[in-house]
Image (tube, grey):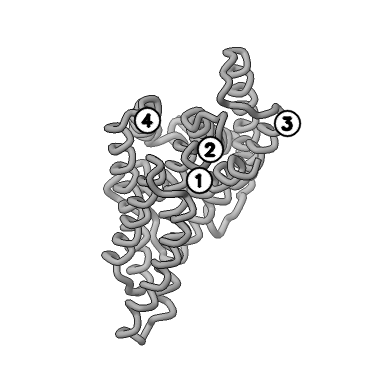
Amino acid sequence: MKDGHKFKGLANRLIVSTTILIAVFLLVFFAEYPLVRGIIFVLTFVLSIGALSEYHNLLKAKEINNSFLLICSSSLLLFITLYFISIKIFPYYILALVFAGIIYLLFLFQFGRIDGSLIAIATHLLAILYIVIPIMMLIAILYISSFNISGQDGRLWIIYLILTTKCVDIGGYFFGKLYGRKPLALALSPRKTVVGALSGFLCALIFSSFFWFILRLSSIEHFSVSFLDITILSAIIAFFSQIGDLAESLLKRDAQVKDSNKALPEVGGILDIVDSLIFTAPILFFYLIIR
């Protein structure tokens, strides 16, 4: 009964997580079809809006006012630009110009609202840098060939990223619940333990090695990476996955909010689902760009 109490709500969490993973993998598998590409962009944009809404609620809990419509409009502009990059109508460096334009617009928007401008601009930029751009990088990895990267299948890399990141969560959750005693960061997340963190790290390394060997045995050519590189990469991903989890906890603790979205029982909210991925997606994206 004691262990059963520790894993209270696990069944609901597994159902939700499994459903989401199956849907994601189906979309990834057919990602090159034009219709599916459009669906992926729309769903990812909706996901980012949901995460931004939760972020906006955290700001409201801190009595910080900002324009949710403005940040959603900025996000839409970035997603549209990325879509045209993915179908190779725009060159990828256009994103930098669009981002610069958004920064200018944020300042222009505040010219008639001088009071509180510093906090408003800072929180808008944080929303873009913390939520929108990392989520967009998930799509950028999926369509990595749009960034002049050849010889790599973005579908394999995005599956690798999602599963490796989630292995950290799964390993940390189960081993932390069963054997964890010493808190990892008591002020941020009392339920996270040192044992859970180390277990999640090891689970990511083990899965990553298994994933690499399976693809090598299958003679798949579009996942070209050495065993040393994949080991180092998975270690970095495992580390920043846990940083991402704690980062969201930091924001929630400051806002004194337990769950970012109470409408999603046993999950916590959209930010709770993607908090690790928004820290690991940039790592993998830049690895693929500079390797």
Quick one: SS at disc 2? helix
Crowd around label 3: few <14 · some 14–19 · many ≥20 (10 Å): few
Per the model, the C-alpha gap separating discs 1 and 3 is 23 Å
Q: Residue type at mark 2?
A: Thr
Q: Which residue is mark 2?
A: 165
For residue 223, say whether it is visible. yes
Does residue 212 sit above or below 183 in this rendering?
above
Q: Which residue is mark 1?
A: 276
Q: Which residue is mark 4?
A: 31
Q: Are marks 4 and 1 in contact (CB under 8 Å)?
A: no
Using the numbered discs, state the Cα–Cα distance from disc 1 to disc 2 in whole angstroms. Answer: 7 Å
Which amino acid type is shown beneath numbered disc 4?
Ala
First in residue order: circle 4 vs circle 3: 4
Residue nearest the observer in this picture, 238 or 125: 125
Given the image, on which type of amino acid does mark 3 rest?
Answer: Leu
The picture quadrant where one finds residue 291 is top right
Q: Which residue is mark 3?
A: 228
Q: Amino acid at mark 1?
A: Ser
